[in-house]
Amino acid sequence: MINREIIYCAGGIVWRYNERGREVLLIQSRKDREWKFPKGHIDDDDPGWDAAAQREVKEETGYDTFIVDFAGFTKYLAKGIPKVVLYWHMEALGESNFEPSDEIECCQWLTFREAVDRLTFLDDKQFLLKFAKNDGTRRE
């Protein structure tokens, strides 16, 4: 049974490597144009938080993923209600079939530094920076 006094969400820090180096995937919400990590609410029929995270990443970005590791959590107030988000490090599988929706305007791959600069919320920036080495690449 989920406590309805807390908003529970799960999401992914989705990584890939290409000629630009290590990149991370961000989404832009349609309503407020904020840049953030793909995430969403835990549904009662999700078999686990990790599965919910993969479902939400797929819904918001079009990417299938596999989980590499647990990344950690963030917490904040959303309209005065505590919100907890568990994140997993993920790798994208194949290509995206992304199409803009009522919620998501776009998704974009960015270098680590670009992503830190683009993220709307300071908490998200600080969360991402936990995974950086001095050169701005992800810690292994």
Image (spheres, rainbow, N blue to C red):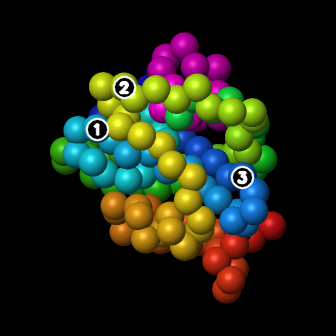
Occupied quadrant, residue 75: bottom left
Q: Indicate whether residue 24 is drawn in magenta.
A: no
Query: Dot 2 surroundings within 10 Å: few (below 14), some, or many (20 or more)?
Result: few
- Say which amino acid is labelled 1: Arg
Q: How many marks?
A: 3
Residue at 46%, 26% (x, y): give it. 99
Residue at 34%, 61% (x, y): give it. 120
Q: CA distance from mark 1 to mark 2?
A: 8 Å
**At which x and y percent is residue 98?**
52, 29
Label 3 residue SS: strand
Query: Dot 3 surroundings within 10 Å: few (below 14), some, or many (20 or more)?
Result: some
Q: Is the C-beta separation of discs 3 and 1 under 8 Å?
A: no
Label 2 residue SS: loop
Q: Considering only vertical position in the picture, is 7 above or below 83?
A: above
Residue 101 numbered tag: 2
- Say which amino acid is labelled 2: Ser
Residue 46 in sight from this viewpoint? yes
Occupied quadrant, residue 30: top left
Q: Indicate whether residue 45 is drawn in magenta.
A: yes
- Say which amino acid is labelled 3: Arg
**At which x and y percent is residue 100?**
40, 29
Q: Which residue is mark 1?
A: 30
- Nearer to the camera, 131 or 32: 32
Residue 60 numbered tag: none
User: Which segment did they paint magenta?
Assistant: 43-60
Q: Is the C-beta separation of discs 3 and 2 under 8 Å?
A: no
Q: Is residue 88 left or right of residue 19?
A: left
